[in-house]
């Protein structure tokens, strides 16, 4: 089977998968738990998926874990072009969104047409944060760096001058929307860290 | 809800997820496509899952992609204790298997009992390589490093003195078992590399 340009369907799939390799070189604001280096967005995506699998019972509403995992597998691919926008950084949301849409056009555009549409739709659903699956996926994407920072003794919170109020408004409200019991369970750990630092 | 030792269920889940972070520091025999550094087993797991999602249509028999993704999400966790055993290396298979079983006892053992049993069963199914889902998952786990090595201009094949016959017997037969059309599609790329090097 051929796709536009004369390449085969498999060629298009392999071109997409090769491009995706670059996500391993996109560095995030968080570090590994041992603070030895910055985390990259590919290994972050794997870790967030593991969090979703293990913490699914804490979802506010029933989720289809298969769809949640697929969203999280794809959610950061656009960072290959658009970069990671740290939640405690000062990027312009509209500009970042435009960059991510252009990135999605290019990167998902490498796939055969049917897969391009299917995977793009899953990513758009995640971004919209409206369906139960997307709301939970977004919660877990927010909670993994909080746990990393706690394990890394505060991690990059001091560097970004994060206050407990900012953490509550930027992260807590979003985690609590998809997994309220999880945020409640983390509050005592977070409060203890800020009390001591 | 409490688990043995007085910790809560959430404490046990978070202890497992924190331990899993160490997979980001387990280095593999393959490099990134740009050959800039060795790949780690966490980002490899993410990339293999993306391969499975995109290449599922090439499976020899129908697969449940959700189960395949879950297998691949978990498949390398034992390497935190047992290390990566490169397919072209010279480790003792029985010794490696014993190490991996001990690692599975310890690492899945961090989870609450019900999740420990469920996740361990999925990992054991992958290792047994008998179900259709496991056979396909194993195929994709073998094909991702082949594609990395091809993209990296041969990657670590020269370092391991890999011959086309070894690649066929150690990798080809296993990829072909789960995804024959995929191996057939890769053969011309592999043959071209060995012809030129
Ligand atoms: Ca993310």
Image (tube, coloured by chain):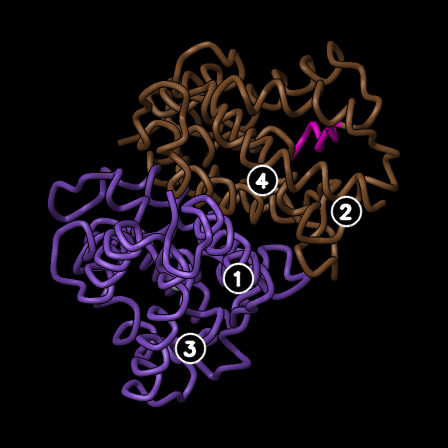
Chain colours: A purple, B brown
Magenta span: B80-87
For disc 4, the marked residue is: B144
Q: Secondary structure at mark 1?
A: helix
- Marks 3 and 4, how far apart at CA: 29 Å
- Marks 2 and 1, how far apart at CA: 21 Å
Q: Kindly report which numbered mark, 4 or 2, lies closer to the viewer in this rendering.
A: 2
Q: Kindly report which numbered mark, 3 or 2, lies closer to the viewer in this rendering.
A: 2
Q: Residues within 10 Å of mark 2 (few under 14, many from 20)?
A: many
- Marks 4 and 1, how far apart at CA: 15 Å
Depth check, front residue: B177 or A138 = B177
- Relative side of A106 to B105, left or right: left
First along the sequence among labels 3 and 1: 1
Q: Residues within 10 Å of mark 1 (few under 14, many from 20)?
A: many
Whether discs 4 and 2 lie on one chain: the answer is yes
Whether discs 3 and 2 lie on one chain: the answer is no
Q: Position of residue B72 (x, y in %)?
A: 47, 33
Q: Splitting the image into 4 quarters, where does residue B164 fall? A: top right
Chain of the residue under the numbered disc 2 shown in the image: B
Q: Position of residue B189 (x, y in %)?
A: 65, 42
Are circles 3 and 2 on residues that touch, CB within 8 Å? no
For disc 3, the marked residue is: A85
Q: Identify the residue at horizontal 34%, vertical 73% (top origin).
A: A167
Whether discs 4 and 1 lie on one chain: the answer is no
For disc 1, the marked residue is: A23
First along the sequence among labels 4 and 2: 4
Q: Residues within 10 Å of mark 4 (few under 14, many from 20)?
A: many
Q: Identify the residue at horizontal 43%, vertical 61% (top origin).
A: A5
**Which mark, residue B154?**
2
Depth check, front residue: B98 or A193 = B98
- Marks 3 and 2, how far apart at CA: 34 Å
**Which mark, residue A179?**
none
């Amino acid at each position: 089977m051929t796709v536009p340009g004369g390449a085969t369907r498999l060629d298009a799939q392999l071109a997409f998968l090769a491009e995706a390799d670059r996500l391993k070189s996109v560095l995030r604001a968080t570090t590994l738990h041992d603070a030895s280096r910055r985390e990259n967005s590919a290994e972050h995506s794997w870790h967030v998926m593991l969090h979703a699998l293990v913490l699914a019972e804490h979802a506010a509403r029933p989720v289809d874990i298969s769809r949640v995992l697929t969203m999280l597998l794809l959610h950061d691919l656009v960072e290959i072009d658009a970069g990671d926008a740290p939640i405690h950084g000062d990027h312009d949301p509209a500009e970042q969104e435009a960059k991510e849409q252009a990135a999605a056009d290019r990167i998902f555009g490498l796939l055969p047409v049917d897969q391009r549409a299917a995977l793009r739709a899953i990513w758009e659903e995640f971004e919209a944060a409206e369906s139960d699956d997307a709301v939970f996926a977004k919660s877990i994407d927010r909670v993994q760096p909080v746990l990393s920072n706690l394990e890394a003794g505060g991690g990059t919170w001091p560097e970004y001058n994060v206050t407990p109020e900012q953490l509550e408004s930027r992260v807590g409200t979003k985690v609590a929307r998809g997994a309220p019991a999880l945020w409640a369970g983390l509050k005592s750990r977070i409060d203890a860290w800020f009390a001591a630092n």
